[in-house]
Image (cartoon, rainbow, N blue to C red):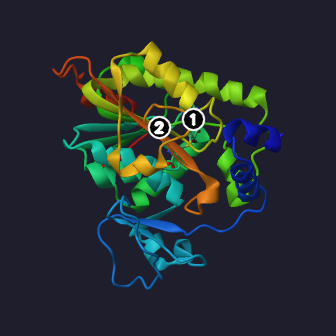
Amino acid sequence: MLTKFSLKLWPDPQQQQAFIQALTEPQPYSPCIAWIKGRSEKASFQRVDALPWQLPFVDRLAVGERPGKHDLHHQGAYYCLDFSSVFAATPLTVIRKKPKVVLDLCAAPGGKSLLAWRFLQPHLLVSNEVIGKRVGMLISNLKRCQIAPVRVLSADPSVLAEAIPASADVVLVDAPCTGQSLLAKGESAPGCFHPASIQHNVKRQRRILANASRLVVPGGYLAYMTCAFSEAENEQVCRWFTRRFPNFEPQTVDALLAFQSHLTDLPCYRIWPQSGLGAGAFTMLFRNTQGTASMAQPLGAWLDENARWSSE
Ligand SMILES: C[S@@+](CC[C@H](N)C(=O)[O-])C[C@H]1O[C@@H](n2cnc3c(N)ncnc32)[C@H](O)[C@@H]1O
């Protein structure tokens, strides 16, 4: 099934082989940390050279470093992530104006929330995780890293779209997906190449994006990302979104031009597992071009009533 899948992605047999090999013989990638406040002198990790587009508060470490074991991690000095997550969050660097509200719709365990908070410094971060049993780890990570001000919600995106429409300057959709890139980390992702599983995810991704579109203020941004490789869950979902919601304009990210997806002419960016940078990621940014006046709802009272956790 993997061979058939790779044929759809790559016309070139060498690329197909490299892709298959990255998934069947996983190699370790550089671990990565995002500093929450500033770099600490106490950390003696061996770093590898930063890439030109790497977020300035992120370090890539030498393979073999174990930053999750260090006291500084327990103290919340940094957050550990796969470099693919840093890549997926990089389109946020296009956003020049400090946002009032950043809403992360699919937030647990919290990596993208944290990167967005750290880079954009919003007046308020709202991190939502619909699956109840995943909310605890999200709160625990936000608390450990002392992210504030933040409210944590646990609601389906459709509920939020109804309750607090046009309320966020930036909405993140790090969508649930087939998780195909887990294989490149040596983890399992049962059924991840099965067409039925891909279609199930596509439907869910479209539904989340449609609801997300209602949450973005005019002039605001919507970032879509996954850790899947299938064209259906990525380029095709984005193509569907641009047709269905033409007021959402695709945004070019100059820093990522070298990562342009070869599967589309939309500004979609990808890290492939055979690049050696990370297990894999897809990312695309849209801007809501409908009007410029803010239609933001008075969020505060609704959040006070509905938040599962608040930093204040
Ligand atoms: C790729 S993970 C998010 C990772 C997270 N953004 C991070 O960087 O740490 C996708 C998340 O979407 C959640 N999810 C599952 N079904 C969902 C739905 N219907 N709507 C919104 N989120 C959903 C999953 O529970 C999961 O936590």
**Residue 82 percent across, percent down from the top left:** 54, 59
Q: Residue 202's spot in the image, x, y percent?
A: 62, 26
Residue 11 occupies which quadrant of the picture?
top right
Instruction: Please name the residue shown 33% across and 17% down the image.
Output: 247
Residue under numbered circle 2: 268
Q: Which residue is pictured at 50% across the width and 23% down the height?
A: 239
| Label 1, ligand 1: CB separation under 8 Å | no
Which of the 4 image quadrants contains residue 145?
A: bottom left
Q: Residue at x 32, y 43 (%)?
A: 125
Question: What kind of residue is marked 1?
Answer: Leu
Residue drawn at the location 42% of the way across and 36% of the way down? 267
Q: CA distance from mark 1 to mark 2?
A: 9 Å
85, above or below 45, in the image:
above
User: Would residue 170 be found to the left or right of residue 194 on screen?
Assistant: left
- Number of callouts in the render? 2
* Residue 265 in the image, given as x and y percentages of width and height: 47, 31
Ligand 1 is located in which of the four quadrants? top right
Reading the image, the residue beneath label 1 is 263
- At mark 1, the secondary structure is loop
Of residues 185 and 267, the one nearer the viewer is 267
Quick check: 246 left or right of 88? left
